[in-house]
Image: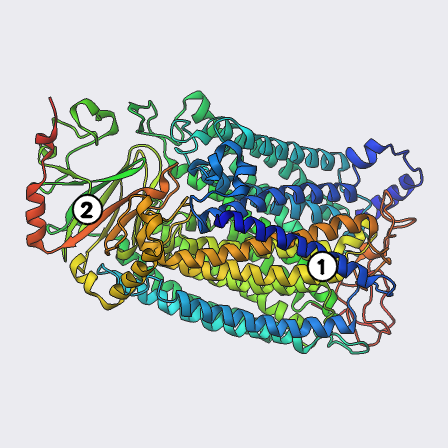
Amino acid sequence: MSAHADTHAHDDDHGHHHKETFVTKYIFSQDHKMIAKQYLVTGTIMGVIGVLMSMMMRMQIAWPEEPNVLFEALLGKWAPDGVMDADIYLALVTIHGTIMVFFVLTAGLSGTFSNLLIPLQIGARDMASGFLNMVSYWLFFVSSVIMVISLFVEAGPAAAGWTIYPPLSALPMAQGGSGMGMTLWLVSMAIFIASSLLGSLNYIVTVINLRTKGMSMTRLPLTIWAFFVTAIIGVISFPVLLSAALLLIMDRSFGTSFFLSDIFIQGEVLHYQGGSPVLFEHLFWFLGHPEVYIVILPAMGLVSEIMASNSRKPIFGYRAMIMSILAIAFLSTIVWGHHMFISGMNPFLGSVFTFTTLLIAIPSAVKAFNWITTIWKGNIQMNPAMLFSIGFVSTFITGGLTGIILGDSALDINVHDTYFVVAHFHLVMGISALYGMFAGIYHWFPKMYGRMLNKNLGYLHFWVTAICAYGVFFPMHFIGMAGLPRRYYTNSNFPLFDDTANANVVITMFAIIGGLFQLVYLWNFFHSIFYGKKSEQNPWRSTTLEWTAPVKHIHGNWEGDIPHVYRWPYDYSKPGHDDDFVPQNVPMKEGEEELHH
Amino acid sequence: MTAFLTIIILLFIAVAIWQMVKIFDLAQVGTSNSQVATDKDNTLNAYLMMGFLIFIYAITIASFWYLGDLPLMSNSASEHGPGLDNLMVISMALIFVVQTFTQFLLHYFAYKYKGEKGKQALYYADNNTLEAIWTFIPVVVLAGLIIYGLFTWTSIMNVEETEDTMVIELYAQQFNWKARYSGDDNTLGMANVRLIDIDRANILGLDESDPNAQDDIITTELHLPVGVPVLFKMRSQDVLHSAYMPHFRAQMNCVPGMITQFGFTPSVTTADMRLNPDIVEKVANINALRQENKEDIEAKGQEVLYEFDYLLLCNKICGKSHYNMQMKIIVETQEEYDAWIAEQTTFKNSLTN
C-alpha cells in the first residue's frame, strides 16, 4: 500500500539529523517518545494530587468533624482548627473525580501509551503530525495548570461533583464553588477537550496511514486496536461535552436559559425560563459514559499485550478480542441514559437504556474469558506488569459484575447514587484502569527510559495495592446497599447509618495504607529513571516492533529502514521455532502457516 | 486526638516503607539481577496468587458476616418492594456464583501455569466453539435478567392514577423538604416559584387565586396512611435534589422547571416496622454503638437513644448542607392519619396579612 512509499520518503529524510537544543528536545519536543514521557510525568503529578484528595475524604468520612493535622496543613482556611469545612469536602469530591477521570486516566494513560506505542508498534517514524502532537500535550499542560490554580480561588474550587449538573454548577449563590472556581473548571476542561481531540485525530490518522509494509489491520497488536478505537470514541463524544460546557458558560455569564428554568434562590426569583437540567445530563453523559470506555479500553489493550507476552502464549481469540472492542465501543455510545434512570426522563427511555446497557456484559464476558484462556497452559512469567494485568482482570470482573445491578433500571432505583455506585465504578474503571496503567509502565519503562524498574519493589507495590483495593471497595458495596448516599460530608446526622461507621473506619485504614504504598512506586519510578539497571533491547522477549528499535531513543525510531512485518503479533511458543517468540519482522519459514485468527 | 495518632502512625508507616525500600535495594547489590522475573519469582508470586484468591474469598465472607445485615434487601415497606428485592437477590446470587467461579479460574491458572525454564507453553490461539459458548451463555442469562428487570421497572414506573390515589407534592429546596397535601378536593393547586411571596408566607409559590390551592396543606413531616397508593409530584425551587426513600425502594430526582413523579403504596406502618425482629436487632445494635460514643453525640445536641423511623433523604449533590437534608416519614393507620391531617393548617389559613 501507499504507506510503503511514504516510508521511503521518511527514510531519506531521516539521514539528516536535526540539531536539537535542550528546548526542542525536552520541552517543545515533537518526538512522540518524549511527548509520551511528558504525558506520563504530568499525569503522575496530577495523580498524586487526586489521590491525596481521596485520602482526605476518607479520613473525613471515618472520623467526621474531628481535627486532623493533615487537613490543617493542606486545606488552610478551609479547615479551621483542623476541622474540615463541608464546602471543601464537596470540592474534594469534585476535583478528585475530575482529575482522576480526565487528567490521570484519560491523558495520563491514553496520552502516554498511545503516543509511545502507536508509532513504535505499527512501524512509523513518528506520529502523522508531530507538531499537533506537541500542541496537544501543551494544551493538556495548560489545562492541568488551570485546574490546579482553581484550587486556590477565594470562594473555593468547583464543588458540584465531577458531573457539574446545573443549576448547582450554574449559580454562584447556590454554592461558593460555582463562582470563579467553576469558571476555571470549565475553561480548563474546554482546553483539555481541545487537547484530547488533537491527540485523537493524530492517533486515528497515524494508525490508518503510517503502518509499515505488511502491517495489515489484522496484524495490529491489540494495544493499537484499543488506542485506535478509543480515539474514535473520543472524537465522537468529547465535542458533545464541549458544547455542554459552552452552553453552561452562556447560562452562567450571558443569561441564556439552556439548562435553567423557574428558580427561586436566596429570596429572589431568577429570570431563567424554559431550560432543562435534564438536557445537560443528556449532553454530559453522552460523553460521560463513553468516557469510562475511553479510560478502560487502552488499559484492556495494554493488558492483552502484556498477558500474551508474559504467558508466552498467543492472546486467545484475537479476532474475538477485536470484535468485542468494536462492540463495546459501539454500545458505549448508546447507553448513557443509564445514569439518568431517575432523572425525570421518560421511563420508557429507561427501558431502552437498560436493554442496551446489559448488552455490554456480553463483549465484556468474552474479553474476560479470553484473558483467562490466554493464561491457561501458559508459561507465566510473573513480572510486575503481569501481576498488574492479572489484577486488572480480577477487579474488572468484580467491578463489572455489579454493573448488572446498576444497569438494571428497576434495581438502580434503590442503589442509585449510594456507595454501591462508588464501589462499582472505582473497581471497574478506576482501579482496573490504574492497574492497566501500572502494568503498562512496568512493561514499557525500559522502552521509555532505557532502564528497568526494580522488580521487587514492583512486587511489593502490587501486592499491597491489590489487597488494599479490595479492602477499600469490597465492603463499600454493603454500605451502599444499606442505603448510604455518596457525597455526604458526614453521616452523623443519620443514626440510621451508625452501623456503617466501623466499616468506614476499616475502609479508610485500607485506603491510607494503599495510598502510602504508592510512594514505593513513585520512588521506584523516579529513582530508576536515573539509576535503574540498564535495559536490554528486548527484555521481555516480546514480538512487537517497538522492541526491534534501539534502546537509545533516536528521532525516527529506527536506524536505517523501518522493519517490515510478516506475521501477527502473537507468535509465542509457536511449534517449529527455536525461541518461544517470533518477532513480527521475522519472515515466514518455508511452509510455515500464519495461523489465523 | 485520634487524628493526631493517625498522623503519627502514618509517619511511622512512611518511615517503614522507606526502610524497606533501602533494604530491597541493598539486597540487590552484587547479584546479577536483571529485573526480569526468575523461576524463583514465578514460584513465589504463583503462591501469592493462590493466597490472594483466598483473600478475595475471605473478604467476601467477612463482608457478609459483619455487614451482611446492612443491605436493604428485605423488610421493604412498600407493595412493589418485595418484587424488587427478589430481583436483587436473584441478581446478587448470580453475580456471586460467576465471581467465585471466574476468580478461581483466573488465580488458579496463574498459580498452576507458573513459568519454569524450559517449559513450553501451548500454542493455542483460537477456538470458535469456546467463543460461542461464552457469548451464548451470557446472552441467555442476560435476556432473562433484562426481561424480568423491565417488567419490574414498568410496573413500578407506570403509575395509574385512580380515584383512591393520594397525590402529594414533595418540594425540595436547599436544604430541606416540604410536603403538600391536596386537601379535601384531592387536587393540588397550581404553583410556580414566581409566585413565592415570603412576606405572606406563601413559601411554595401557590397560586392564591386557584380554588384548588385553598385547601392544600403544607407540612414538614410526611405522613402516609398505610395501604393507600400515593403518587408523589416532585418540584425543586433551586437546584437538583433527589427524593430518596430507601425503605420504600423509591427514588426520583426533583428538577427545577419540571414536575417529576414516583408512586408507591406503603405497606407497613412505622409502629409495625419498629416491632419487626430484624429492625429491633438493628436498632439495638445502633443504640449499643451510640452508647459508646455518648459524649460526642450529646455534644452535638442529638438524642443518644435512636428510634427507627422511615426517612426521606436528599441523594443528589445540592450544596453545603446536602448531608443533612432529610424529612421524617410516618406511615400510620387511616384513623391516625385522618386525625393528624385534621390538625394541620390549610394554605388559605396559613397566609399572613
Q: Nearer the viewer, mark 2 or mark 1?
A: 1
Q: Is residue B78 above or below residue A210?
A: below
Q: Where is residue A403 in the image (x, y as percent from the top left)?
A: 46, 59
The residue under the point 44% across, 61% down is A404
| Label 2: chain letter | B
> Which quadrant of the view contains residue A572?
bottom right
- Circle 2 crowding by C-alpha within 10 Å: few under 14, some 14–19, many from 20: many
Chain designation of label 1: B
Residue hosting label 1? B20
**Depth check: A508 or B162 in front?**
A508
Q: What residue type is labelled 2?
A: Leu
Q: What element carries label 2?
A: strand
Left or right: B30 in relation to A108: right
- Identity of the residue drawn at 53% across and 51% down: B5
Q: Distance between the Cα atoms at labels 2 and 1?
A: 59 Å
- Kindly indicate the quadrant of the structure image that contains residue B318: top left
The residue where tag 2 is placed is B222
Tell me, yes or no, whether the two marked residues, 2 and 1, touch with CB atoms within 8 Å. Answer: no
Residue type, mark 1 in image = Met
Image-based side of A507 in relation to A533, left or right: left
Image location (x, y in percent) of residue B123: 74, 75
Residue B128 visible here: no
Question: Which element type, helix, strand or loop, lies under badge 1?
Answer: helix
The x and y percentages for residue B92 are 41, 67
Q: Which residue is drawn at 91% across and 33% down?
A: A19
Say whether residue A212 is visible.
yes
